[in-house]
């Protein structure tokens, strides 16, 4: 199967961090905790999602607020159209760039090596950063061809990801929305194994097979939509669990993801939510984890469907030719 990640031939522009509990000076311990990728790079345990946060002032303010309050991990994508704002907030915040972990993603309709290299350059220009911390293939298929087989094309794109990693302009590479068959195909022919798979993950939707596969293969699972894009917030069973801990539904949902060994990426533009989503320095007891594990229908389905339609509609901008 896969070759392990290698650091040979890498020109390190991005510093390989040794941020021993570098400290955000936050009261929340979770903000100083990390997952460690297969290549040793540390990833702050909670990231701020930015999907549906438009380029501009409101997003800049939300990101600046999050960074000022201890967040050190931001998840964006070329397709979100907000890379310039993410870059500005990171550059302007006064925090050492090495303390902030920035992820972006290759648009899923780019399925050739040259196109991927060009798109990465465009992402870096938009961000205005010297290096990226994590670059992901956004999905195994273009949004309008979900489920189709692009495994061969993804292998070609992965060659570009390896080139980018070796150039030192990105500290880690991975994929998103990949199933086991997408990953195994890629891993048979890769030189550097994907270090992350970012997948939809929330109470009631834990994608156990792919999660287990990744965790067995040293691939960090990042959980997107940990609040089911808002559709889980009214769940009565989770609310009952939250009451027991004098907590809230979002906090239980985020804590649950962490206790599954997965990295949650909650999105919020509201200061009080941004703060609440990292106020998770507590432990959900085993019995309650078992109860949460058993929940199957946790969301208002209409809202999830609306979210999926929005993903399908959010066509990323074309890459330069
Ligand atoms: N790789 C992929 O294909 C993919 C797909 C989807 C998402 N993602 C990533 O994952 C991130 C998160 O997923 P998501 O955007 O679907 O949403 P989410 O984090 O599951 O939920 C966000 C929704 O919950 C609300 N919310 C957040 N915190 C709250 C709180 N404490 N109390 C009440 N409401 C709260 C937000 O509203 P407010 O903003 O008003 O607080 C927003 O409506 C994305 O932003 C993106 O970075 C990746």
Image: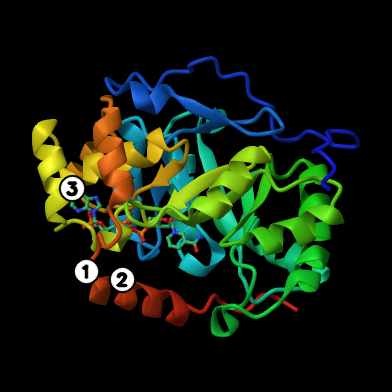
Q: How would you rate the neighbour count of disc 3 (Cα within 10 Å): few for under 14, some for 14-19, many for 20 or more?
A: many
What is the crowding at mark 1: few (fewer than 14 residues within 10 Å), some, or many (at least 20)?
some
Q: Position of residue 87 (x, y in %)?
A: 50, 50
Q: Which residue is mark 1?
A: 300
Residue shown at 36%/66% (left/top)? Answer: 52
- Quarter of the image holding residue 138? bottom right
Task: In the displayed orientation, state which residue is furthest to the bottom.
Answer: 144
Give the residue pinned by disc 3.
Answer: 238
Q: Residue at x 75, y 70 (%)?
A: 151
Mark 2: secondary structure: helix
Q: Position of residue 38 (x, y in %)?
A: 69, 33
Color theme of the render: rainbow
- Determine the secondary structure under disc 1: loop
Residue at the spot of label 2: 304
Asked if the residue at tag 3 contacts the one at tag 1, i.e. Cβ–Cβ closer than 8 Å, the answer is no
Residue 102 location, x and y as percent? 53, 44
Where is residue 6, by image quadrant? top right
With 271 as the anchor, is 293 left or right in this view?
A: right
Q: In this image, 164 relative to 52: left or right?
A: right
Query: Marks 1 and 2: CB-CB under 8 Å?
Result: yes
Gap between marks 1 and 2, in whole Å? 7 Å
> CA separation, marks 3 and 2?
17 Å
């Amino acid at each position: 199967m896969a070759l392990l990640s290698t650091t040979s031939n890498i020109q390190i522009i991005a510093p390989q961090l040794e941020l021993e509990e570098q400290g955000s000076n936050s009261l929340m311990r979770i903000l100083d905790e990390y997952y460690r990728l297969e290549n040793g790079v540390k990833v702050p345990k909670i990231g701020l999602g930015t999907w549906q946060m438009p380029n501009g002032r409101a997003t800049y303010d939300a990101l600046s607020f999050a960074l000022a309050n201890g967040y050190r991990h931001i998840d964006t994508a070329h397709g979100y159209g907000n890379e310039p704002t993410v870059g500005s907030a990171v550059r302007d915040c006064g925090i050492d760039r090495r303390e902030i972990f920035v992820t972006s993603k290759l648009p899923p309709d780019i399925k050739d090596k040259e196109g991927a290299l060009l798109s990465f350059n465009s992402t870096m220009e938009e961000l205005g950063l010297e290096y990226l911390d994590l670059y992901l293939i956004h999905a195994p298929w273009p949004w309008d061809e979900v489920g189709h087989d692009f495994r061969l094309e993804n292998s070609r794109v992965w060659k570009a990801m390896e080139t980018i990693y070796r150039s030192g302009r990105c500290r880690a590479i991975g994929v998103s929305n990949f199933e086991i068959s997408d990953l195994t195909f890629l891993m048979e022919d890769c030189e550097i194994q994907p270090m992350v798979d970012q997948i939809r993950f929330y109470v009631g939707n834990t994608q156990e097979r792919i999660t287990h596969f990744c965790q067995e293969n040293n691939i960090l699972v990042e959980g997107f939509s940990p609040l089911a894009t808002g559709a889980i917030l009214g769940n009565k069973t989770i609310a009952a669990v939250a009451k027991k801990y004098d907590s809230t539904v979002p906090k239980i949902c985020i804590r649950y993801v962490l206790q599954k060994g997965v990295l949650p990426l909650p999105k919020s533009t509201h200061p009080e939510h941004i703060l609440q989503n990292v106020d998770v320095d507590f432990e959900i007891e085993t019995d309650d984890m078992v109860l949460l594990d058993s929940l199957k229908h946790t969301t208002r389905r209409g809202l999830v469907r609306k979210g999926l339609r929005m993903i399908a509609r959010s066509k990323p901008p074309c890459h330069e030719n």
